[in-house]
Image (cartoon, rainbow, N blue to C red):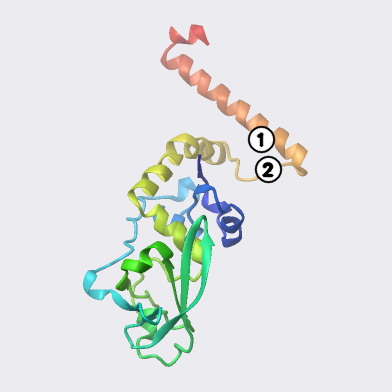
Amino acid sequence: MKYVLDCGYASENILKELTGHDLYMPDRELAHKKTGGKIKPEERNEAAAEPPLIESSHALLQFHYDRDNDCFQCPAGEILTFQRERNLQGVLYRHYRRYGCSRCSMKEQCIGPEGKRKELWIQTKHIPDLQVRSLPPHHGSKKKKTGMRSISNPLTLLMREKLATPDGKKTYARRFPSVEGVFGVMKSARNGWQFLRRTRERVQVEWSERCIAHNLARMIGFVRVNPIAADNI
């Protein structure tokens, strides 16, 4: 079963707790990129184009894998050593890390001005055939940000990669015609951005009332469009 969730639920802890489920849940930054930086439907203009994971093959940073020593060599010649192997959402990953990047001449392109270390998460199954891991440069403050910012949370990064695949895009796109329209009407057209009552029981009653109102409105609209078929309701 596939679970397609809103960005409001996304966090590294939630992804860790739901390990083993087939999730499709963008983080808040990715959702902002897809909606032009707007969360409320009435604030959205034309959605921004999806940021490319790789801008240009000529601008990629090359991390060469040393199979004999099980490590990576970064573009500056420094070594990222193996740290551990970890199971993330049912997939084995090998974690490589390099400390002491503060004085590196390629720091801003690689980890950004505020970064202190470089990390790589590589699927274990890819290690036997891997020669080079190519990564896009970090989008720092000196250049206009055209891509996603560099993140160190491994599960969030994996979710971004999953949603960037053709299957991930197709699966998450099914959320909008199924539930986004309903939530948009309840929040925007009926001013339902917050609940008027407190405690879980009272909120459940209020939410049920909103759902009834939405269904009644749908039925009334259906009767107006097709009064003959409405006799079977």
Q: Residue at the location (47% across, 89% down)?
A: 100
Instruction: Mark 1 or mark 2: name the one nearer the start of the chain.
Output: 2
Where 139 sits versus 207, above or below?
A: below
Q: Which residue is mark 1?
A: 207
Q: Is residue 134 above or below residue 73?
A: above
Image check: 176 left or right of 46?
right
Q: Are marks 1 and 2 in contact (CB under 8 Å)?
A: yes
Residue 164 found in image quarter: bottom left
> What mark, if any, has residue 232 been given in the picture?
none
- At horizontal 56% and vertical 25% (from top left) the residue drawn is 215
Residue in the picture at 35% in, 91% down:
105
Mark 1 to mark 2 CA distance (whole Å): 8 Å
Q: Quadrant of residue 208?
A: top right
- From the top left corner, tell me how far across and down residue 224 is, in percent: 45, 15
Up-down: is 50 above or below 200?
A: below
Q: Residue at left 76%, top 37%?
A: 202
Examine the rendering and report whether any part of residue 13 can be seen: yes
Q: Nearer the viewer, residue 75 or 114?
A: 75
Residue 44 at x, y = what percent? 42, 50
Between residue 43 and residue 179, name the one nearer to us: 179
**Which amino acid, mark 2?**
Phe
Q: Which residue is mark 2?
A: 195
Neighbours of disc 2 within 10 Å: few (<14), some (14-19), many (20+) = few
